Amino acid sequence: MHLRFALISLFVLLLSAALCPGQAMGGAVLMDSTGTQGTPFSADVVEETTRVLADGNRIHEERHGRICRDSQGRQRNEMEFFPQMAGTPTFQHVTIMDPTQHLLINLDPQRKIATVNHLRPAPSPQMTVTPQSATPEAHVQAQARRQVHEEQLGTMQIEGFEARGTRITMTTPAGAEGNEKPIVTVTESWGSPVLRTVLLTKRDDPRNGQSVHRLSNIQTGEPDLLLFQVPPDYQVKDNNPQP
């Protein structure tokens, strides 16, 4: 349950990897699971989604959060979430990735509970094993269901940092998923080579609407080390304690 906040959309993962090797992007929050080292920074996070219903009604949501990463690759993400029940206040979720200790920590500020997950170190390239499902036949079938076109957009300044842009257009042919017409999804992403993270992502999907993920108020410098630790007044639940 808690791990879903750190899971990564495969499509955006591939896009982010092309811009910033080792960097992953979560569906709601940027999360680097490999411990990218480099320029430490802190920034505000804004996520917007807009959907237009069949009757013309528009649904717009905006969420706010915070991200910080130190020079050792530790990363903290804070994001507000909207409950499904009307009238219920929003709640905050905090995820800490500590590659130095191989830990993924989820903080529940409302109940003051910390859930700790121990992660296995990434295998060396010599130990990498190709999954059984990644056969040539499976690859061909997957490519037949959708067409992907990548376009380099050059550079532009975002929050005072040079960012490189990539636009990926994914087309699902008619009939591939029961669709009468082709489904075209466009994702535009701008990553900073200096910060080694994605600063701006725009996604247009006719099934889910338009979404924007952006960083603002970016400040470089080491964040407080306490931000990557469990607060002393939290109850700790260790999902897989080490012997």
Image: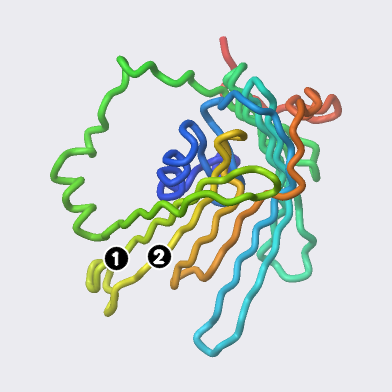
The residue that mark 1 highlights is 172
Query: Where on the picture, by quarter, is residue 58?
Result: bottom right
**In the current view of this chain or complex, which residue is farthest to the right?**
233
Compared with 71, 20 (above or below) is: below
Image spot of residue 2 (x, y percent): 60, 41
**In the current view of this chain or complex, which residue is farthest to the top?**
243
**In the current view of this chain or complex, which residue is farthest to the left?**
137
Image spot of residue 15 (x, y percent): 43, 46
The residue that mark 2 highlights is 185
Q: Is residue 170 left or right of residue 80?
A: left
Image spot of residue 20 (x, y percent): 49, 36
Q: How many callouts does the rendering have?
A: 2
**Identity, as a three-letter code, of the amino acid under mark 2:** Thr
Residue at 59% across / 60% down in the picture? 212
Image spot of residue 200 (x, y percent): 59, 52
Q: Is residue 36 left or right of residue 129?
A: right
Q: Is residue 231 left or right of residue 177?
A: right
Query: Where on the picture, by quarter, is residue 102?
Result: top right
**Identity, as a three-letter code, of the amino acid under mark 1:** Thr
Tell which of 144 and 102 is nearer to you.
Answer: 144
Could you say whether the residue bearing mark 1 is in a helix, strand or loop? strand
Does the residue at mark 2 contact the one at mark 1 (Cβ under 8 Å)?
yes
Tell which of 160 and 110 is nearer to you.
Answer: 160
Residue at 63% across / 76% down in the picture? 59
> Which class describes the residues within 10 Å of circle 2: few (<14), some (14-19), or many (20+)?
some
